[in-house]
Image (cartoon, grey):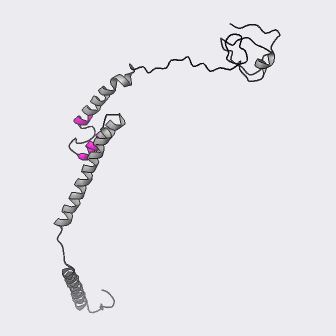
């Protein structure tokens, strides 16, 4: 309950709030200063500020996100199985799915995604090793022989062209 001050208070131009339980006004300067609100006090303790910590906060567990998270996971799984992310047998598709599940806070989705990424990296390394083994290995001596033969063939072809055309010399390049 608010008691009336003993004299008139001139309202400031800036709007202010008056709490319901503002207490007793002691003088006009407390609330008439420009831009200030009344102190939040109860009873006759006017002018003293206090912190009202009598609030109770809780989390509503009936929110749609909390109750439908499993339904969201099931829907995402259905899209994955239907091929919305790509071929479910492809490891890149599997990684994409588990990345999405991690985003949706599915338990241990990050661990599963990391294991699939490691598996993919091992598969890529094995493929590269198999490709390197399947390519014929040429010894440096054989490589030099092949280059020498190619050079002789190119010179012989150049001579045949110049022999067939007497106006062109080997120095003119053809």
Q: Position of residue 87 (x, y in %)?
A: 22, 42
Specify whether residue 61 is painted magenta. Answer: no
Magenta range: 79-97
Relative side of 23 to 164, left or right: right
Q: Is residue 171 visible?
A: yes
Q: Position of residue 131 (x, y in %)?
A: 20, 63
Q: Nearer the viewer, residue 3 or 141?
A: 3
Vertical side of 11 occupied by 92: above or below = below
Vertical side of 20 occupied by 121: above or below = below
At a point 71% along the width and 8% down the height, the residue shown is 2
Q: Is residue 96 visible?
A: no
Q: Position of residue 25 (x, y in %)?
A: 76, 13
Question: In the picture, which quadrant includes the N terminus?
Answer: top right
At a point 30% along the width and 30% down the height, the residue shown is 73
Relative side of 28 to 2, left or right: right
Relative side of 38 to 80, left or right: right
In the rendered image, which quarter is residue 86 located in? top left
Specify whether residue 95 is painted magenta. Answer: yes
Question: In the picture, which quadrant includes the C terminus?
Answer: bottom left
In the rendered image, which quarter is residue 102 located in? top left
Q: Residue furthest right?
A: 7
In the rendered image, which quarter is residue 75 located in? top left
């Amino acid at each position: 309950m608010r008691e009336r001050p003993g004299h008139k208070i001139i309202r400031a131009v800036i709007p202010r709030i008056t709490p319901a339980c503002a207490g007793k006004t002691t003088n006009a300067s407390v609330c008439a200063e420009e831009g200030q609100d009344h102190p939040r006090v109860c009873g006759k303790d006017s002018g003293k500020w206090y912190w009202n910590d009598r609030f109770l906060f809780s989390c509503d567990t009936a929110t749609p996100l909390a109750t439908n998270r499993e339904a969201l996971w099931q829907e995402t799984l259905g899209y994955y199985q239907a091929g919305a992310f790509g071929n479910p047998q492809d490891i890149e598709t599997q990684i994409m799915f588990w990345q999405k599940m991690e985003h949706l806070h599915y338990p241990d989705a990050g661990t599963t995604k990391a294991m699939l990424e490691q598996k993919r990296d091992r598969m890529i390394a094995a493929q590269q090793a198999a490709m390197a083994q399947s390519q014929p290995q040429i010894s440096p001596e054989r490589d030099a022989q092949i280059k020498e033969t190619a050079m002789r063939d190119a010179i012989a072809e150049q001579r045949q062209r110049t022999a067939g055309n007497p106006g062109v010399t080997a120095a003119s390049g053809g």
